[in-house]
Amino acid sequence: MKVLLKEDVINVGYAGEVHDVSDGYGRNFLLPQGKAVMASPGMMKQAVVWRRKAEAKREELRAEYEALSKRIEEVTLTFTARAGETGKLYGSVTTTQIADDLNELLGTDIDRRKVGIEPLRQLGEHQVVVRLSGEFQPELTVIIENEAGEIEPAIEVPEYEEVVVVETVEPEAEETDEADE
């Protein structure tokens, strides 16, 4: 099914473009949601208008993300948590906590699913990525300190080098058919 996109659709295309999508996807999602219309010669004339509007909207969003990226990169969040002597936290600092503090500090509404990948479970300084879009992924600094205000563990855990054991196999003596004769 050929459809003309009325707005940008992730993993399909940009507004004003004609794309061939599966019948079910077009009939059950794109058309009822108003994200696309059936591609016809009459609609192709309107595509130019939709394309211009979408480009202006993308440019505005790009400028907004660029300004927000600069603000996020300057942010340093500090969390206090209980930790063991090795610096491992008894709990964790979750992406929800980071997103909530970031939103409160900047006055934004960034979704927690766009902040970081997994919870932080170690004392110290961490770089956490915020995925605003494919082009803009700024990193903010998160410092996790224990209740005494220290970010270093009380006991250093030695790092062990990985040892690779290689066995050598002695080649066996070759048996020949001549010795049997």
Image (tube, rainbow, N blue to C red):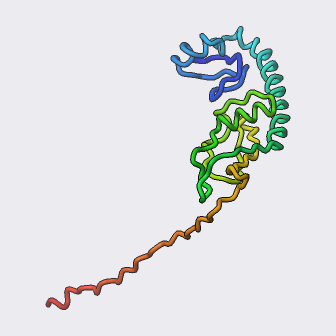
- Pick the residue in front: 37 or 149: 149
Image quarter hosting the N terminus? top right
Q: Is residue 3 above or below residue 75?
A: above
Q: In this rendering, does residue 139 appear at all?
A: no
Q: How many marks?
A: 0
Q: Indicate the position of residue 63 as horizontal and vertical percent values.
A: 85, 31
Establish if 89 lies above or below 45.
below
Q: Could you say which is closer to the camera, residue 124 or residue 33?
A: 124
Does 8 sit left or right of 49 as displayed?
Answer: left
Q: Is residue 125 left or right of residue 57?
A: left
Q: Nearer the viewer, residue 134 or 103?
A: 103
Q: Residue at x 78, y 28 (%)?
A: 108
Nearest the viewer among 123 and 48 is 123
8 to 38, vertically: above or below: below
Which residue is situated farthest in the top direction here? 42
**Farthest residue, direction left:** 181
Question: Residue lying farthest front?
Answer: 148
Which quadrant holds residue 13? Answer: top right
| Residue 98 in view in this figure | yes
The structure residue drawn at horizontal position 66% and vertical position 41%, both measured from the top left corner, is: 116
Horizontal and vertical percent position of residue 153: 65, 59
| Residue 133 falls in image quadrant | top right
Horizontal side of 128 relative to 25 (left or right) equals: right
Q: Where does the image place residue 43, in percent across and percent down from the top left?
A: 71, 10
Whole-percent x, y for residue 102 in the image: 75, 35
Q: Write the residue at 14% across / 90% down.
A: 181
Q: Report the residue at 66% width, 23% height from top.
A: 9
